[in-house]
Structures are given as structure tokens and as C-alpha cells.
Image (tube, rainbow, N blue to C red):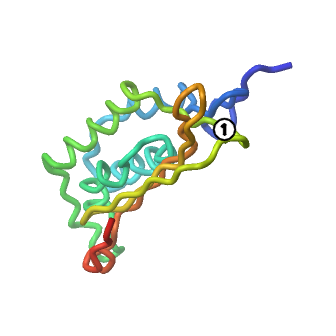
């Protein structure tokens, strides 16, 4: 019987789900984008693992600002120092943070923690058990200009 399974870029074991190391290495090998297509490719790959990264939307916001172009505005692509910092920070997190999600424990209560800023909203679903805190899921979302005006309260 297999003790772990590789599925859709994830390593699944009896205890937890983690990003596949091969996929993480592929992201780490991506060079800093020089075109809109390259930037979209990078942020798309990072989005696949956002559920493992707390505050992902805040960290990725500088990149989303330059990749969120309509068809008519695609020639306006500009990659500046703010995007470079976000790019390297996101890649660094892939190798310095424990990227794992625990399976829910049916006998422990769930705790949902949320937060918001002018840039995004986010939350974490976790459980406190006798063996410690178990992270079940992270979620975050970059706010659109309209949503940002509404000023979510926390």
C-alpha cells in the first residue's frame, strides 16, 4: 500500500497535503518576468499553491497590478522594483515556510480567523488539538478597486 500519492501538483499523505517538490522546484527555476505572458505564467503557478500561503493576496498584489490588463491595454506592461520584490518574496516563501495543510480532525472544533486590508481579505481555517494547532486551509483575495472602496471591517 502506498504511503503517499502525487496528485495535481500535490503530495498527499495520511496526515497532510503539501505542494509537490517537483512543481515547487519548477517555480523556483522561473526567471524574473520581462513580458506580460511570463508574469501571467508565474502568478498562475503561484496561485495554484495560494491555499498554503497566508496573506498570499497581499504579497502577490504588486504582480497582480501589472498582470491584470484588458486586451486593449496589454502593451502597457511595466515590471518595476515593487514587482521584483514581490516575485522574490513569493519564491522565498516556497522554500522557507512550512507549506502544508492538515486534514480536519472530526473531534476538534474549527476556528475561522479572518482579516482585511485595503488590498485584500483573507482567512485561515484551523483547529486546536491536543497535539497543537492544525491548519486546514488558507484563503485570501485581492480586492478590486470597487471592493476596496467599501472598506471591509475586521
Secondary structure beneath label 1 = loop
Residue positioned most to the right: 1
User: In x, y percent, where is residue 35?
Assistant: 28, 52
- Left or right of 80 on screen, residue 133: right
- Quadrant for residue 53, please give it: top left
Q: Residue at x 32, y 62 (%)?
A: 116
Quadrant location of the N terminus? top right
Q: Residue at x 80, y 20 (%)?
A: 2
Which is more toward the observer, 140 or 105?
105
Q: Which residue is mark 1?
A: 103
- Quadrant for residue 134, please give it: top right
- Image height of 29 relative to 52, above or below: above
- Image height of 89 relative to 67, above or below: above
Residue positioned most to the front: 130
- Left or right of 48 on screen, residue 16: right
User: In x, y percent, where is residue 107?
Assistant: 72, 41
Quadrant location of the C terminus? bottom left
Which is more toward the observer, 23 or 95?
95
Q: Residue at x 41, y 57 (%)?
A: 114
Label 1 CA crowd tier, 10 Å (few <14, some 14–19, many 20+): some
Which is more toward the observer, 5 or 67?
5
- Left or right of 107 on screen, residue 62: left
Residue positioned most to the left: 81
User: In x, y percent, where is residue 36?
Assistant: 31, 56
Numbered marks: total: 1
- Quadrant for residue 74, please give it: bottom left
- Left or right of 79 on screen, residue 154: right
Amino acid at each position: 500500500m502506498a504511503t503517499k500519492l502525487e496528485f495535481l501538483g500535490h503530495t498527499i499523505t495520511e496526515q497532510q497535503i503539501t505542494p509537490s517538490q517537483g512543481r515547487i522546484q519548477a517555480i523556483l527555476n522561473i526567471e524574473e518576468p520581462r513580458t506580460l505572458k511570463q508574469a501571467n505564467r508565474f502568478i498562475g503557478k503561484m496561485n495554484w499553491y495560494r491555499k498554503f500561503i497566508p496573506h498570499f493576496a497581499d504579497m502577490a498584489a504588486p504582480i497582480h497590478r501589472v498582470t491584470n490588463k484588458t486586451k486593449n491595454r496589454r502593451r502597457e506592461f511595466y515590471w518595476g522594483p515593487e514587482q521584483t520584490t514581490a516575485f522574490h518574496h513569493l519564491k522565498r516563501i516556497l522554500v522557507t515556510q512550512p507549506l502544508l495543510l492538515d486534514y480536519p480532525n472530526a473531534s476538534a472544533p474549527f476556528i475561522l480567523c479572518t482579516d482585511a486590508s485595503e488590498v485584500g481579505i483573507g482567512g485561515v481555517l484551523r483547529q486546536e488539538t491536543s497535539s497543537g494547532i492544525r491548519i486546514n486551509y488558507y484563503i485570501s483575495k485581492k480586492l478590486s478597486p470597487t471592493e476596496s472602496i467599501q472598506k471591509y471591517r475586521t
